[in-house]
Amino acid sequence: MTRKYAQFEKDITRAIANLSGQQLPNCLPIWMRNIGINPGAVIIGATDIGPHDHKNKTDILVNLDHSGPLKISVKMQNADYMGNWYTHARIVEEFGQNISDKITKEVTDWSNRIAHDSSWENKPFVGVSISFGKRSCNTGIPLQQIFSEDECNKPVVAMGAGIGSDDSVANSLYASDIIPNNVGHLISSLEEMNYDNIVKFTGDFMLILRPVNPMTEGSNRYKNVFSQFVPNQPLSTQTTVTTMSKLNTLGSFKKVVNDGLNHNHILNNLEHKNIIVPRKQK
């Protein structure tokens, strides 16, 4: 989270907290009543819970008297992603095995294509991690190219709202850069947390492919991979590889299983087969 974004969340929280003791309008949108928000409920307080846990999709928790809470996801208009790096376990838990399998296949096919692109020649990678959001370069694939329309709905809503029903799961979207100055402004600025509104806000939602260059990146090597480089055979002598063209002569990218495999694991396996891709040292 950027400093600007964190401050924006705090400012919104403070503005809502300053409305404590005031009532919500007696006429609320149907979607708001459907999520348990009662007309005329009194605002008790607001808490910025977003930074407390990376799994929180709720940024601001607004407690109401005799009503369910507003669990607001605050997304500035220039935010470019709604999810951090994803693990195998998280993908399966939130989206299901079928979607996980499709992601793995897509990432593996992409890896084998991009490995022969000259722009990656001096940025060798042995695995590709993923996140989701907006992307303008060739490291983003629209979800519609991977999934059916029905399949797109589940990951998009999960990334926007979260999974479950506790306070970490958002039930409304504050997609504005303007801080509310009264209760009416707050209510009119909130939108239902659903597929259409999330896509309206984010634009082309994409699977973001994140190859990791071991020679220049450190902590990112611990991220789970959704494709892995597999050599055709072990080499008889130790060989240092610093380019993609050299790596391509030794093997190709294969699908992974959901076993927590990361970039360092692949590098270790390659070293056991005498293929050395240098790693950035601390």
Image: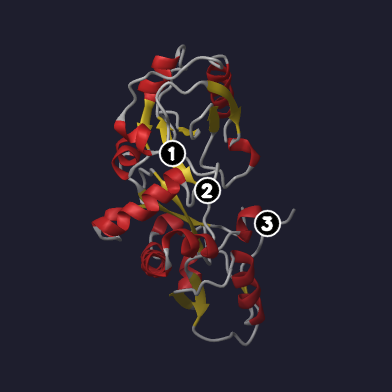
Question: Could you tell me which residue is drawn at 42 percent across and 60 percent down?
Answer: 95
Q: Which residue is mark 1?
A: 171
Question: Could you tell me which residue is drawn at 35 percent across and 40 percent down?
Answer: 198
Confirm whether residue 139 shows in the render.
Answer: no
Few, some or many residues within 10 Å of mark 2 (<14, 14–19, 20+):
few
Few, some or many residues within 10 Å of mark 1 (<14, 14–19, 20+):
many
Q: Which residue is mark 3?
A: 280
Confirm whether residue 87 shows in the render.
Answer: yes
Which element carries disc 3, helix, strand or loop? loop
Which element carries disc 1, helix, strand or loop? loop
- The mark found on residue 84 in the picture is 2
Specify the amino acid type for callout 3: Lys
Q: Which one is nearer the viewer's eye here, 112 or 13?
A: 13
Specify the amino acid type for callout 2: Asn
Q: Earlier in the sequence, mark 2 or mark 1?
A: 2
Q: Position of residue 58 (x, y in %)?
A: 52, 38
Q: Earlier in the sequence, mark 2 or mark 3?
A: 2
The outermost residue toward the left is 149
Question: Label 2 vs label 1: CA separation?
Answer: 20 Å
Question: Could you tell me which residue is drawn at 55 percent across and 15 percent down?
Answer: 21
Q: To which quarter of the image does residue 1 belong?
A: top right
Give the mark toward the camera: 2 or 1: 1
Q: Earlier in the sequence, mark 1 or mark 3?
A: 1
Give the mark toward the camera: 2 or 3: 2
